Image: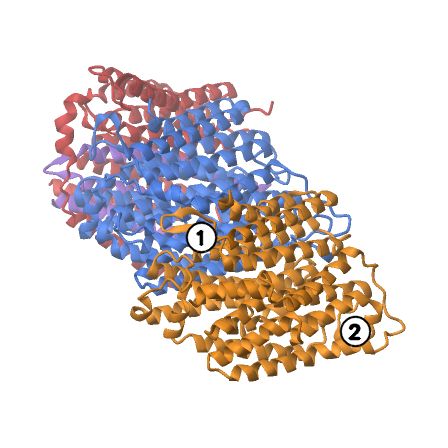
Amino acid sequence: MTSELIYICAGSGLVGLAFYRLATCRDMLLRVLSLNVLAVGIAILFLASARDAGMTDAVPQAFVLTGIVVLVAVTAALLALAEQIDRQRDE
Amino acid sequence: MSLAFDVLLAFGVVFTAAAALGTHDRVASIAGFVVTGLLVALSLVRLGAPDVALAEAAIGAGLTGALLLRSAWRLKPAESRVSPPIDRIIVALIAVCLSGALAWAVYTAPGAALYPALVSERLAESGVTNPVTAVLLNFRAWDTLLEIAVLFVALILVRIVAPAHPQPVVLGELMLPFARIVVPMCAFLAGHLLWQGASVPGGAFQAGAILAGGSLVLMLGGFAVPTPRLLSWGMMVALLGLAVFAVAALSTEALTGTLLLYPDGAAKIWILMIEALLTLSIAAMLCLLFCGMPRRPLK
Amino acid sequence: MSEFLPIAILMTSLGVAPLILMMPEHASRLRTTVNLAAAILKLALVFWLTAVVVQGGSPDLRFTVVPGLDLHLQANALSVLFLALSAVLWLITTVYAIGYLENGVDRSRFFGFFTLCVASTVGIAMAGNLFTFLIFFELLTLATWPLVVHRGTAEAHRAGRIYLAYTLGGGLALTVGTIWLYALAGEVTFTPRGVLGDLAQTDSIALIAIFVLLIAGVGVKAALVPLHGWLPLSMVAPAPVSALLHAVAVVKAGAFGIMRIVYDVFGIESVQDLGLATPLALLAAITIIWGSVCALRQDDLKKRLAYSTVSQVSYITLGVALISPLAAIGGLTHLIHQGIMKITLFLAAGNFAEGHKVKTVSGMNGMGRLMPISMFAFTIGALGMIGVPPLAGFLSKWYLGAGGLEAGQPAVIALLAGSSMLNAAYFLPILYRAWFLDPPKDAPVGRNLGWMLVLPPALTAALIVAAGLFANAPFSPLGWTRFVVSLEYL
Amino acid sequence: MSDISLLVLLPLLAAVGAATTPRTSGIWGLTATALTATLAVWLTLDVFQDGARYIAISGWVAPLGIVLVADGLAALMLLMTSGVGVIVAIQAASWGVFPSSCASKDAESLRAGFWPMWLATLGAMNALFLSGDLFNIYVAFEILGLTAVGLTALSGTRSALRAAFDYLSAGLAGSLLLLLGVALAYGAIGRVDLAAVPMLADTIAGRIALAFIVAGLAVKAALFPLHFWMPEAHSSATPVASALLSALVVKGALYVILRISIEGGAGMEALRFALAVMGAAAMLWGAWGALRATRLKLLVAQSTVAQIGLITLAIGVAGDNLQQNGLWQAAALLMLSHALAKAAMFIAVGRIAEELGHDRISGLNRKELRPGAAEFAFAIASVSLIGLPPTAGFIGKWILIDGLIARDAWIWVALILIGTALSAAYLSRVVSRCLRGGPHVAANAHHPAWRIGDITALGLATSALVLGLASALPLGLLEITAK
C-alpha cells in the first residue's frame, strides 16, 4: 500500500498545482498546459486506486487510456482556437 | 530500494510539473511538461499499467508536447497579469486543501474493485488475451466508439477554426537524417504494437500515436510536404475510422442481434480488423490535428 | 349537440383571434366581416345555450391536462348571466370599434387581441373549476396588455407596465392560492354552496390565507382598493378598450371571480364560519367611498369614469359579501347593470373626444347641443349610475339596501345613500354643463361621426331603460339573477 | 439493427457523411435529423407500450459492460432533442447558418462545418440520454463539449472565438472534474455504472465522488456560480447555434444531474440541498443579469442562466423518492418547456437582429419597421418562460409548487415566485418594445417580410404554449421507470 500512497500524493499534488495555476493565470497556453497536468494527475489517482494485491485492474487502465486520447483531441482543439484568436488580433 | 525509487519518481513528477507551471518561459515550461509526462509514464509502469504508460509517453507527453510547442511558436505571449498576492495565497490554500482531501479520499477509499474478477472470468470469450484490449474493444467497445467520435469532432472543430491555408511548420534539412532512422522504426513499431496488442501491452491507440509521430517527423523534416491532396487523403482515412467502426457496430447487431457482440468464434478477427483500421485512422487524425487541414475550396 | 355549445362559444372568439392577428393590415373589409360574423354567431350560440340552461341542461366538457387537473367548461345559470353580458356587449363594442379605428394603425393586432379578450371573458364565465378559471384569467391579463399600450406613446407604455405589474402580481397570488387549495382539497370544481366540506373546521388558518390570496388575485382586476391603481392609468387606451375591457371584461372578470370564490369554492357558510364575510364587505365599502371621492377630483372625463368604475364594481363585491339573498340579487344584477351603464358612458365619452376633442369635464359645456344623441345616452347612463328610478341602477341599489337590512347591517343603507350622493356629485355637474351651458364659440371640431359610433351608445342606453322598466320579465337581468341566487341560497 | 443503437450511430454516420461531402451536407443533415426524430418517436411509442427497454452492449451486462437504458425520462429527452433539432435544422437549412450581418469571410465553407457539428451533437446527446454508465457519460460529454464549442465558434467573430475558448476550457475542466468523480467512485465501490449510484450515496467516499461528478456536471450545465463561460458563448454564437446550445446542449448535463439525483436515494440529501440553493441563486443572478443586459441575445442567454437555476432548484427539492412524489417530473417538464421556448426565442432574436442589423434592446424601435412575426414569437415564448398558463412551464411550476406546499416548504415557494416575477420583469422589457406603435412607427412603415425563421420560431413558440395542455403525455411517459 505504501507505494500507492506515494503515487496518490503525487497525483493529488498535480491536481492541486494545476488548480492553482488555472485559478491564477490568464495566458491561454498555460491554461491548456495546466488542464493537461490536471488530467495527468487524475490518471495517476485513478490507476493508483486500481491496484489490488499487486495486480492492476484492466478496466480503469482502459478508462485512463481513453482519457488520454480524448485529452489530446481537446488540447488540439483548444490550441487551434487560441491560435485563431491570436491571428485575428493581428488583423 | 523500490520504495526509494517510487519516492524519487513521485517527487520528480511533482517537481517537474511545478517547474513547468511555475516558469514564465514557454518553451521551458513545455519542456518541463514533456519531462513530467515521461516521468508519469514511468510511474504508470510502476503502477502496473504498461499500456497506459505507452500511451502517456507517445500521446500525453510526445504529441501534446509537440502541439504545445507548435502553438508556442505561433502564439504571441499574452500580457501577463499577475493576480494580487492575497488572491494567490487564498487559491494556494484552497489548492493545498484540495490536494490533501483528494489524497485522503483516494487513500481511504475501500476499493473493492469488481472488475478484475469479471475480466479474468470472461477474458477467454473476448477473443484477445490482453485484458486492456479486451476491455477497449470488446467489453466496453461502446466507449471506444464514442472516443473515436471525440477525435472526429475535434478534427472538424480544428478544421472550422483553422485558417483557410495552414502554414506547415518545417524544420528542414536538419531533420532528414533523424527522419531516415525514426520513420521506418516508427512504422515497424506501430505494426508490432498493433499486432501484439492482442496479447501483451500495446494496441491501436499507441500504434496510431507512434505512426502519427513518424509521419509528423516526415513532415517537419520537409520530407513529405503536406500538399492539399495529401491532406485530403489523410482526411479521408481519418474520417473512415468512425464510419467503419460505426458500420461494424451496426453489422454486428445485424449478424448477432446485439450491438457490438462479435459473431461466435470470430471475435479475434473482428477486433484485429477494427484495430488495424483504427490505427491508420487514429494516426491520420492525430497528424491532421497537428498540422491542420485546408478547408474545402469554395467551389 | 348542445354538449359542445361551450366549446363552440369559446372558439367563436378563441379560434378567430389568431386568424385576425394574421390578417394583413389593409384587409379591413375581410377583418370587419370576420369580426362581426363571429360576434353575431357567438350571440346566437349564447341564446341557444340560454335556452338549453333554461330547460335544465348544463353542458359540461372536461379535458384532462394532468391527472388531477382538468380543463373544465361548464355552462350553468351564473355563467350564462356573464356570457350573455359579454356576447351582447362584444357585438356592440365591435361595431363601435370598427368605426372608431377606421383610419387607425395596427388594426389587425388590435382586433386580434380584442377578440382574445372576449375569448378569455367567455372562458372565465364558463370555467368549471378554479384551474380553468385561472388559465383564462391569466390569458385575459396577457390579451389586454397590447390593448392598453395600443397607442404606443410613452404614457401608454408606462400604463402598460403598471397594468402588467399589478395584474401579473395578482396572477401570482391567485396561482399560489389555487395551487394551495388544490393541495389541500384536491380538484376544486365550482359547486353551488362550496366544496370545502369539513376543511373549514380543520384547516381554518390555511383556508383564510388561501382566501386572502385568491381575493387579492382577483381583487386586482376588480380594482378593490388598494389594488386599483392600474385602472385610471389604463384609460390611455382607445375608447372601445376602455369601454369593453375596463367597464366589462377585466373588472367584471375580477368581480365574477370574487363571486365564484365566495359562492362556488368556499360557499357562503364557510366564508361566514371563517369570519371572512365582514372584512370583505368592509373592503368593498371602503372601495365604494374611496373610488367616488377620487372620481370627484378628476377633471379628465375618462379618469372620472374610471374611478366611478372602481366604486361601482365594489357594489357587486358588497352584494356578495353581505351574505343575504337579497343583497346577492342586488350584487349580481349590478354585474349586468353596471356593465351596460358604464359601457354607455365610455362609448359616449369616446364620441365626445372624437367629435369635439373634449376629454375633460370642464370642456363639456354645451355638449348636449353639439352631440345630442351621445349626450342623451350619456345622461341615461349617468342617471342610472346615480340610481334614479326606474333606470337599471336603481334596482341594484334597492336590492342591495334591502339585503343590508336583511343581513342586519343597516349601515349599508347609509353607505348606499352616501355613495349615491357622491355619484350625483360627480355626474350632475357634467350633465349640467352639457345641457344648460352654451358651447364655447370656438368649439374644436373633430371628425364626423358615422352611425357606427353613434348607434352603440344609444342602443346600450335603451338597454338601461329596458332593464329597469321590464325588470319583472322572466329574462330580464333581475329575473335571471333571482334564479341564480335561488341556487346558492336554498 | 435496433432503434436504440441507430439513434446514436445514425447521426454519427451522417456527421461523417456531411464532413466528407460539404456540398451536400445540408441534405445529410436534414435527412439524418428527420430520421433520428422518427426513430425517437418510434422508440417512445415502444416505451409507452412495453415499458422501459435495455440493451446490454456486446452482450455484457453491467457493471463490466455498458447498458443502454431507454425509460420514460430518456425517451422524453430523446424526443425533445430530435424534435427541437428538426425544427432548428429546417431553420439552419433555409436561412443558412449565417445571417447576412455576419462578418465571416468564407461563410460558405463554414456553413459546411455546421452540419457535422450538429449531427455529432445529436448523436452525443442521444448517447448521453441512453447511457447507463458514468464513464460512458464522460466520453459522451467530451463529444458534446467539442461540438458545442464548434457551434459557438462557427460565427468566426473574435468574440465568438474567445467565448469558444473559454467554453472549451471550462468544459474540459468540468469533464476532468467528472472524470475525477468517476475515479473516486471507482475507488469507493469498484464500479462506475449508473445503477451503482445508490451504493455511492450510502458511503462517505461515494458521496465525495458524487459531489465531484455533480460539480463537473454543474460546470457543463452552466449552473451558478460555474456559469461564467456561458452568457458570452451563447450570445456570440450564430442564432441557430445559440438555439441549439441554449435549448438542448445544457440539458444534457441537467439530465444527468436529474438522473443521479433521483437514483441517489436518501444519501444524496445534502447534495440535493446544495443544488437547490445553487439553483435559487442562479435564478436570481441570471434574472439580475437579464435585467441589466443591453443586448437582446445577452438577455436571452442570461435568462437561460435563470431558467437552469429554476430547473436545478426543482431537481434539488424533488427529493429522492422516484414513485411517491412527482416533483422530479416537474423538473423534466420544465426542461422540455425551456427547450422549446428558448429555441424559439433565439431564432426569433436572430430574425429580429437580421431585420434591424443589430440586437441592442434600446434600439428595438425603428421608425420604418413595424413589429413582425418574429417579435410575436418572442412574446409567446416569453409567456412560456415566465410560466403563465397554459404553457408547460406553468404546469411544471404548478406541480412543483403543489408538492412544495404539501411539504410546507414555503421558502422555496417564495423563491420560485420571486424568480417568476423577475422573469416577467426582464422579458417584458423586450416584449413591450415588440408592442410598439403609435408615434414610434412612421406612417409608411412596413412589416418585415415572412421568412422561414418566422415560421420556425412561431412553430416552436406555439408548441411550447400548447404543450401545457398536453402535459399528460410527457408526464405519462415519465411514469415509465426502469425498475
In the rendered image of the structure, the colour used to display chain B is red
In the rendered image of the structure, the colour used to display chain D is blue
Determine the residue located farthest toward the front in the rendered image.
Answer: C473
The quarter in which the C terminus of chain D is drawn is top left
Q: Which mark is residue D252?
A: none
Q: Residue D394 carries which label?
A: 1
Give the chain letter for orange.
C
Q: Where is residue C307 in the image (x, y as percent from the top left)?
A: 63, 73
Asked whether the beta carbons under mark 1 and mark 2 sit within 8 Å of each other, the answer is no
Q: Position of residue B76 (x, y in %)?
A: 50, 43
Q: Position of residue D446 (x, y in %)?
A: 73, 45
* Residue type, numbered disc 1: Phe
In the rendered image of the structure, the colour used to display chain A is purple
Q: Mark 1 lies on which chain?
A: D
- For label 2, the residue is C364
Left-right relation of C301 to C332: right
Secondary element at image label 1: helix
Q: Nearer the viewer, residue C156 or D173?
A: C156
